[in-house]
Image: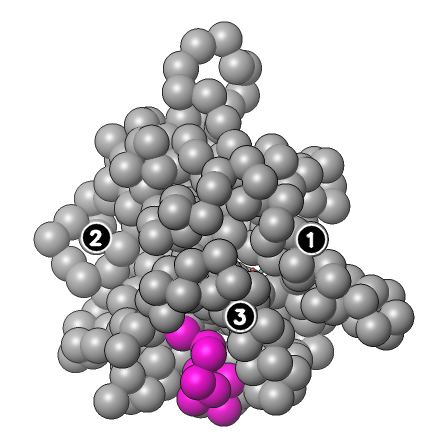
Amino acid sequence: MRQPLIAGNWKMNGTKASAKSLISGVVVGVTDLSKAEVLVCPPFPFLSLAESLLAGGRVQLGAQNLCTEAVGAYTGEVSADMLAEFGCRYVICGHSERRQYYGETDSLIGKKLLASCRGGLRPILCVGESLDQREQGQTESVLAAQIEGVIAETGVDLFEQVEIAYEPVWAIGTGRTATPEQAQAAHAFIRGRIGERSPSIAATIRILYGGSMKAANARDLLSQPDIDGGLIGGASLVVDDFVAICQAGDLLAG
Ligand code: PEP
């Protein structure tokens, strides 16, 4: 049984005050949950505040990006060791916004996975097709190329320490969600692809769904056999919505 992981990706949102109230609300809201793992990924400047508010609790802390390098003259960058020192256990890698706006390639993302694991963080590798690619029937070839491109850099064994998030680009922040059947098909494809390299990793790796997951659709998505959690953008900024998704994950964990 794979433990569900419900992760909030705040992106570049919030103030010190709103971060404090959001984290405090989530901490209280998930107190009674016991099965799902809950994670919040605030922007870098709020990590220290989040670390202190989350200390000793069940909500984990993660970051949204990191540098491929460990230390040195890389202006504006943040290393895995720095994130770990501020209590991070996870880091999102290769989000479609970073691929689209910052030109991140599969090779660079593979290097970020290696840097994460070297620093003791678990990377959440994001993959997903654009609307155009889906409409051209290229979903599986795009997913395969993204996964193979990363594995070429890391090897498959590293995936023991990795989570994958399937995030169809057309569903991110659009309010348009993949149907449970579409998402399940993509997740099963991803698991199968990993399984061609390592059946044991395929059986244990968690594959999260991301793309307009909300309280109203979380249950249907999370009940699919190959969906092991969610990476939540917009709804992770609203305490009640995020907590409701965490509750759905907890219930479905049985
Ligand atoms: C995301 O950006 O990771 C995401 C899933 O966003 P949203 O939930 O807002 O679609």
Range of residues picked out in magenta: 220-228
- Whether label 1 touches label 2, CB < 8 Å: no
The residue type indicated by label 2 comes to: Leu
Q: Residue at the location (39% across, 47% down)?
A: 157
| Residue 128 percent location from the top left of the image | 66, 61
In the picture, measured across the screen, residue 101 lies left or right of residue 14, that is: right
Q: In the depicted view, which residue is nearer to us: 155 or 107?
A: 155
Instruction: Tell me the CA gap for discs 3 and 2.
Output: 36 Å
Please tell me whether mark 3 sits on a helix, a strand or a loop: helix
Q: Residue under circle 3?
A: 192
Please tell me whether mark 1 sits on a helix, a strand or a loop: helix
**Image: 41 above or below 253:** above
Q: In the depicted view, which residue is nearer to us: 81 or 26?
A: 81
Q: Which circle marks residue 145 in the picture?
A: 1
Q: Residue at the location (62% across, 36% down)?
A: 107
Q: Residue at the location (34% across, 53% down)?
A: 160
The residue type indicated by label 3 comes to: Gly
The residue type indicated by label 1 comes to: Ala
Indicate the quadrant containing the N terminus: top left, top right, bottom left or bottom right.
bottom left
In the picture, measured across the screen, residue 135 lies left or right of residue 233, that is: right
Give the mark nearest the N terminus, 3 or 2. Answer: 2
Label 2 Cα crowd, 10 Å radius (few <14 / some 14-19 / many 20+): some
**Image: 75 above or below 43:** above
Instruction: Tell me the CA gap for discs 1 and 3.
Output: 14 Å
Q: Is residue 223 magenta?
A: yes
Give the mark nearest the N terminus, 1 or 3. Answer: 1
In the picture, measured across the screen, residue 22 lies left or right of residue 34, that is: right
Give the mark nearest the N terminus, 1 or 2. Answer: 2
Q: In the depicted view, which residue is nearer to us: 89 or 22?
A: 89
Q: Residue under circle 2?
A: 54
